Image (tube, helix red, strand yellow):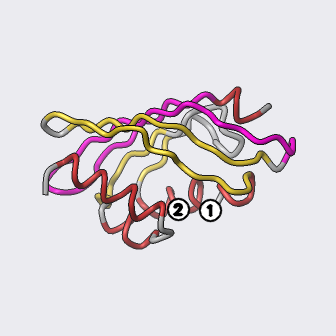
Amino acid sequence: MSSTDLVKQAYSFFASGNVPGVLALFDPAIEWNECRGMPFVEGDGLYIGPEAIVTHVFMQLPVHFDGFNIAVTEIFGADNKVVMVGYYQGTNKATGNAFKANATHVWTVKEGMLTHFFQAVDTAAISR
């Protein structure tokens, strides 16, 4: 499976709620860089390993948002780098406001596993 296909599979699993499927694609030492400005980010937003990502990111989404989803516009890559361009949608529970926020993710793939994640997102649109 190509690096791009692996990342496409991860988004497909996430969209269908198959969190175990997503986690099976993560390297045990994956480095996850969550954008500061997200309502649940602690410190510098760097989480290491699947368990930290589940606890500090995945489990926080339904706490802070209703109907959160990622709409993927395109996924492209070269070698071991893959980029997702799209947007987040949902409702911020703290404000009651719906949002549509531009988002870009950069993934690194090594030996068939996702090893690094970098997020850039319009957190101002989310927090309004």
Horizontally, residue 40 falls left or right of residue 81, namely right
Q: Which residue is mark 2?
A: 54
Frontmost residue, 109 versus 77: 77
The answer for how far apart the CA atoms under marks 1 and 2 are is 6 Å
Q: Position of residue 83 (x, y in %)?
A: 32, 35
Q: Earlier in the sequence, mark 1 or mark 2?
A: 2
Q: Which residue is mark 1?
A: 59
Quarter placement of the C terminus: top right
Horizontally, residue 14 falls left or right of residue 60, namely left
Q: Which residues are magenta?
A: 94-122
Which residue is painted at 85% across and 46% down in the image?
94
Report the amino acid beneath label 2: Val
Q: Position of residue 97 (x, y in %)?
A: 82, 40
Marks 1/2 in contact by CB < 8 Å: the verdict is yes
Quarter placement of the N terminus: bottom left
Which residue is painted at 40% across and 65% down in the image?
13
Q: Secondary structure at mark 1?
A: loop
Which residue is painted at 74% across and 56% down in the image?
66
Q: Is 103 located above or below residue 23 in the figure? A: above
Q: Is 103 located above or below residue 59 in the figure? A: above
Q: Position of residue 26 (x, y in %)?
A: 32, 59
Q: Position of residue 84 (x, y in %)?
A: 37, 38
